[in-house]
Amino acid sequence: MEQLNGHLEALEAEAAAAIGAATSASDLEDLRVGLLGKKGKLSAVLGAMGRLPGAERPLVGQRANVLKEQLQGLLAQRLGAVKAAAMAERIARESLDVTAPCSYVPPGHRHPLISTIEEIVDVFSGLGYRVSEGPEIESDYYNFTALNIPEHHPARDMQDTFYLQDGRLLRTHTSPVQIRHLETNPPPVRVIAPGRVYRRDAVDATHSPVFHQVEVLAIDEGLDFSHLRGTVTAFLQRFFGDLPVRFRASYFPFTEPSAEVDVQWRGRWLEVMGCGMVDPAVLTGMGLDPERWSGFAAGLGVERFCMVRHGIDDIRRLYTSDLRFLEQF
């Protein structure tokens, strides 16, 4: 009995030292299994009780149970201390320095040109039109010939063109998108074609070699100039407000009759877009019977609409990326 009590006392001292030196929860779990598990050191001591006289076994068993409770208490106490230390270290490592200056990224917003295009598209979408897009590098056929502007036609001089070495060109308007759309979509069609276009214009307050257009096309049976006038007027009054609108006779090679459209803005007439009935020659070139199908087309410059809407006096302001200017929108 004295020998077993000596083993228990030695185990108590050894276990207390090992538990006190443990630095992690996994170490403490290993100690718990090694001390109190089925094959642990305490179980080994208790296994030798079978050699004791019957009267001494309860005394040794009582001492072993007390030791077991002590060891469990030490393990739980040390585990709590280890977890608290780990949390304190994490808090110190992840703490925020509230005195440090913050990193601030100002919120972005739509460029005025983009918001103008989106508003124009939104209005025509409400009128039943859908958006169609095409390439910015075009062939002579789509940019001119299919639009009733054959080679050597004087109307080509109206659009100073950037030609590429391979014979292609940078589109001078988004009207080629209408031709491409009609090739794969038989009428009736109602589409708008917003996009970037290019012309060899000298840069000044109202001209830029790169600008944006929105083209409108409607092809159906029985369309006439009254439908064109109603559509254009509805769009302009939705965009600018309930303002007077007037149509003036004009010329475009791909429409006949053609008109320029003005709005009375702040006491004066401003030209804002061109339009007309699709020339029968264009319909014939697309394989459509002009006796059955008719249509109208219109085109506008986005920069012009944006400048009028916001009172911008120089088109170059839209392309300089000056935050002092852009932050106003």
Image: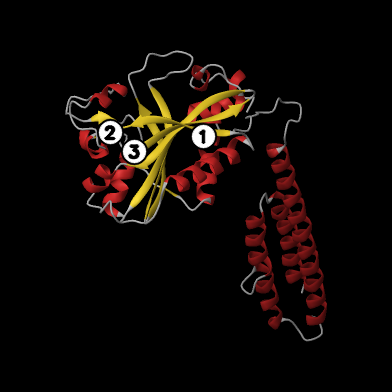
Task: Say which of marks 3 and 1 sits in front.
Answer: 3
Q: Which residue is mark 2?
A: 137
Q: How many marks?
A: 3
Give the residue number, with chain letter if any, for mark 3.
Answer: 256
User: What's the coloring here?
Assistant: secondary structure
Position in image of residue 98 (x %, y %) = 76, 30
Residue 240 lies, in percent from the top left, at: 60, 34
User: How far apart in space, not on screen, are marks 2 and 1 (Cα)?
Assistant: 21 Å
Q: Which residue, given by chain and number where applicable, does mark 1 sit on?
A: 114
Answer whether labels 3 and 1 touch (C-beta < 8 Å): no
Circle 2 SS class: strand
Residue 211: x %, y % from top left: 42, 26
Residue name at image x 75 percent, y 54 percent: 78
Q: Could you tell me residue 128's position as x and y percent?
A: 49, 53
The three-letter amino acid code for the residue at tag 3 is Glu
Q: Residue at x 21, y 37 (%)?
A: 141
Residue at image location 73% in from the left, 71% down from the top:
4
The C terminus - image quarter: top right
Residue type of the residue flagged with mark 1: Ile
Q: Tell me if 114 is positioned left or right of 164 in this view.
A: right
Estimate how packed mark 2 is, as few (under 14), some (14 to 19) or many (20 or more) residues with alpha carbons within 10 Å.
some
- Identify which residue is drawn at 56% across, 17% down: 313
Secondary element under disc 1, as helix, strand or loop, is: helix
Q: Amino acid at mark 2?
A: Ile
**Circles 2, 1 touching at the beta carbon (< 8 Å):** no
- Mark 3 is surrounded, within 10 Å at the Cα level, by few (under 14), some (14 to 19) or many (20 or more) other residues, namely some
CA distance for labels 2 and 3: 27 Å
Q: Determine whether 261 is above or below 315 in the image.
A: below
Q: Earlier in the sequence, mark 3 or mark 1?
A: 1
- Split into 4 quadrants, where in the image is the N terminus? bottom right
Q: Nearer the viewer, residue 141 or 229?
A: 229
Query: Of helix, strand and loop, which one carries label 3?
Result: strand
